[in-house]
Amino acid sequence: QVQLVESGGGSVQAGGSLRLSCAGSGYTHTTNFMGWFRQTPGKEREGVAAISSGGSWTRYADSVKGRFTISIDNARNTVYLQMNDLKFEDTAMYYCAAGTHVTIPSMLFDGKYNYWGQGTQVTVSS
């Protein structure tokens, strides 16, 4: 089992920045990819960014490219999502996820991830 705990969400004005953290514990060595997903009421969960456990592979949703950066610190079992130039449409509940059998083509597909955190709310005011 892998446990994930997100932190760093909050309220910010458009154009501002936030950094989300996801601390993992348990059998984290069994995971091969980590991802950040987001969801707003009435909408499907959306893949935002993902990274391989070794940090070599990253992928971003088109809507966040150039603004968000995902990184991983294996010594701390922590994944980060640096979010810059935030927009109103970035408002959502953000979830961290870990997968044990994620493939590169499916990095942003939530169905491939086994473990999920409880989520952290990001609210951007225009």
Image: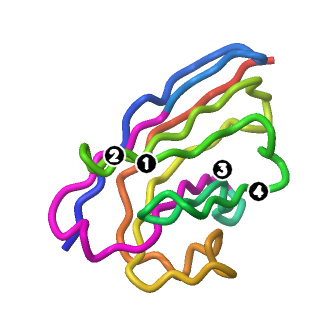
Q: Residues within 10 Å of mark 2 (few under 14, many from 20)?
A: some
Q: Is residue 32 above or below residue 24?
A: below
Q: Residue at x 76, y 23 (%)?
A: 85
What distance separates the C-alpha of mark 2 from that of mark 3? 24 Å
> How far apart are the two marked residues, 4 and 1, measured between alpha carbons?
18 Å
- Who comes first in sequence, dot 1 or dot 2? 1
Which one is earlier in the sequence, the residue at label 4 or at label 2? 4
Q: What's the magenta bit mostly, secondary-structure-wise?
A: strand
The three-letter code of the residue at mark 4 reads Ala
The residue indicated by pointer 3 is 40
Q: Which residue is mark 4?
A: 61
Q: Residues within 10 Å of mark 4 (few under 14, many from 20)?
A: some
**Proximity of marks 3 and 4: CB atoms separated by less than 8 Å:** no
Span shown in magenta: 20-41
> Which residue is label 1 attached to?
72
Q: Going by the picture, which residue comes out furthest to the left?
A: 26
Judging by the rendered image, the residue that carries numbered circle 2 is 78
Residue found at x 63% / y 16%: 12
Which badge, 3 or 4, comes first in the chain's sequence? 3
Tell me if label 1 and label 2 are in contact, CB under 8 Å. yes
